[in-house]
Image (cartoon, coloured by chain):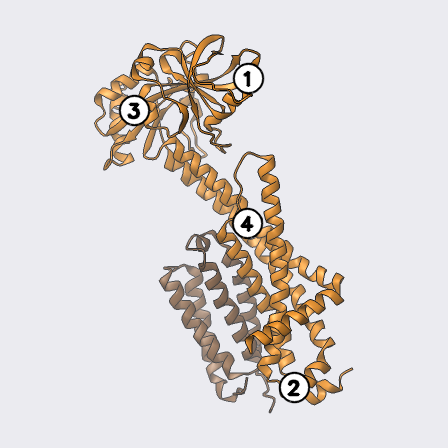
Amino acid sequence: MAHVQRPKIISIITITSIILILLAFPMLFMPSIKRMGDFIPMTIGIIITLQFISVIGIWHMKQWGVQLFIAMFTIRVVTFMLLEVFDFRFFFNIFYSLLFIIFFLIYYKEMDKNL
Amino acid sequence: MVFTLLKESIVFAWQALVSNKLRTFLSLLGITIGIFAIITVFTIVDSLERNIRGSVQSLGENVVFVMKWPWTFGPDYPWWKYMNRPVPVYSELAELQRKIKGADALGFRIGARKTLKQNNNTVENAIVSGWSFDYSKIKSFDIIDGRYFREDEAEGGYNVVLLGYSVAQGLFPNDENAVGKTIKVAGRNCKVIGLIKKEGESMLGNSMDNQAIVPYNFGRLLMDVKSENSDPFIAAKAKPGVTNAQLKDEITGVMREIRGLKPLADDDFALNETNLLSKNFDGLFDMVSIAGAIIGGFSILVGGFGIANIMFVSVRERTNIIGIQKSLGAKNYFILSQFLFEAVFLSLIGGIIGLLLIYILTLSLHSVIDMEITLTRSNIILGLSVSVLIGIISGFIPAYGASQLDPVEAIRTN
C-alpha cells in the first residue's frame, strides 16, 4: 500500500485535536454531567474515545478517520442537544470541529481508502 | 471469532502480567490510583450529600424557621444588629397559631445539653429538647417502642420523656425495656414513654440519637427559655399548595405585628428555610466534585500513558509474532483487536483494583464513623467505564501501529 504524505496543516490540526480531546476527558467527571444519569458519563466517554480514534486515523491519512470524525461530531452535537447542554464548550466544539472538517475534506481525496 | 479474539487477548495480557510482574504492576498503578482518587472523592461527596440531605429533610420540607440568626449570610453580614435581637418565645407561637392561615402546623422547640441518669448509668451532654405538641408534625422521626406524648401531657408539662437511640443505650445498656422506667433528667424524675429509632450520625448535628424529648412546658423548667443558649425557635410547615415564599410573607407580617415593629424598622427575626441550606451545600459539594474531577481526571490520563507505554513495549517484543500471524493470513483488524483487548484488559484490572480498594476503605470508614458511606452503582459504572475507555485510548496507537506492520519486515525483527 502506498504511503500518503501528511500535510503540515493536518499534523497541526490532529495534534491540536488530540490535546483538546484529552483535555475534554476530565469533563466526564463533572457533577453536572454525573447528575444527568448513570450512563451519561459513559456515553460521552465513548464519543470522546471514538473521536480520539478518528484523529489517529486522520494522522495516518486514512479516509475512515475523516468519516468517523464527522460521524462523531454529528453524534456529539445531537447528544449534547438532547441533554440540553448549551454552554460555551458546546459552541466552541462546534466551531473548531467544523473548521477542522473543512481542512480534512480538502485533503480527503489524497487520503488512503484502506483500513 | 470475537470469543477467540477475547480469549487470546486475555491469555496475552495474562502472560504479560505474569512474565513482567513489576513492570505491569507499576503501569497499572497509575490507573488504580486515578480510579481510586476520583471514585473515592465521589463516594465521599455522594455519602456526605446523602447524609446532609437526609438531615435537612428530617428537619422538615416546606418548613420555615423563625429564629434569631439567619442560616446564610454574605460578606456584609451585620452581626452587630442581629446580636440585639430577641429570641423567639413560646407566647409568640400561640399568636402565630391563631393568625397564620397558610401553615399546616406550627411548633416550638428549645434544647440544651443536660445530664441524664438511671441508677448507676449516666449519659452526659445529651441534648434535652423541649417540644410543643405540634412540633412532631413538622420534625420527622420514628418511634420503635412506646408512644409520643399526648396533648394534655404537653400542655400540663408532664415529666415524660422520649429517648433517642444512643441515650437509651447509655441509660439502659443491658437492652432492658426502658419504656415505663423512671430516669433523672437534669436532676428531675422523668418517665420514659417512648424510644426513637436509630438515625445514625448527622453532618448537621441534629441526629435524634443523642436527644431526649420532653414536653416544652416541662423542658422550660430545665433550661432558661429566654437565653440564646437554649436555641429556641418556631417552625411552621406550609399547607399543601402554599409556597414557602407565601408562608414567609404571612409570618413576616404577623411577627412584625406581634413584636410591634414600626413600618420602617428592620425585622428583628430571621426566617430560615431548609432548601436554602440544601442549596448552600450543593454549591460546596459541586466545588469539591469539580476539584476531584480535575485532579482524578488528569491522574487517570497519566495512568493511561503508563498503559500506552507497556503496550508499545509489548508490540515491540512481539513484532516477529505479529509478522508470523500476518503471513499466516491474520487481518489487520485481528492484530489491532488483539492488542486493544489486551490494553483494555490491563486497564480494567487497574480499575477493578482501584474500586476494590475503595470498597475496603468504605468498610473501614463505616466501622470507624457511624455514617453510611456507600460505593454506589453509578460510581462503579463510572469507574469501570472510565477504565475501559482509558484502555482503548492508551492502547489504540500501539495497537494500530502493530496492525499496520509489514509482515516481511516484522518477521525479520529480532
Q: Label 1 neighbourhood size at 10 Å, few (<14), some (14-19), many (20+)? A: some
Instruction: Name the spot of residue B242 as percent of width and height, x first.
Output: 24, 35
Whether A91 is drawn above or below B122: the answer is below
Q: Is tag 1's residue or tag 2's residue first in the polypeptide sequence?
A: 1
> To which quarter of the image does residue A76 belong?
bottom left
Q: Nearer the viewer, residue B32 or B65?
A: B32
Front label number (1 vs 4) = 1
Helix, strand or loop at label 2? It is helix
Front label number (3 vs 4) = 3
Distance (Cα) linking label 2 and label 3: 81 Å
Q: Residue at x 67, y 64 (%)?
A: B306
Q: Is tag 1's residue or tag 3's residue first in the polypeptide sequence?
A: 3
Q: Are marks 2 and 3 in one subunit?
A: yes
Q: Are marks 1 and 4 in one subunit?
A: yes
Q: Nearer the viewer, residue B284 or B265?
A: B284
Q: The residue marked by circle 3 belongs to what chain?
A: B
**Numbered tag placed on residue B291 in the rendering:** 4
Q: Quadrant of the C terminus of chain B?
A: bottom right
Q: Is tag 2's residue or tag 3's residue first in the polypeptide sequence?
A: 3
Q: Amino acid at mark 1?
A: Glu
> To which quarter of the image does residue B95 belong?
top left
| Rendered shade, chain A | brown
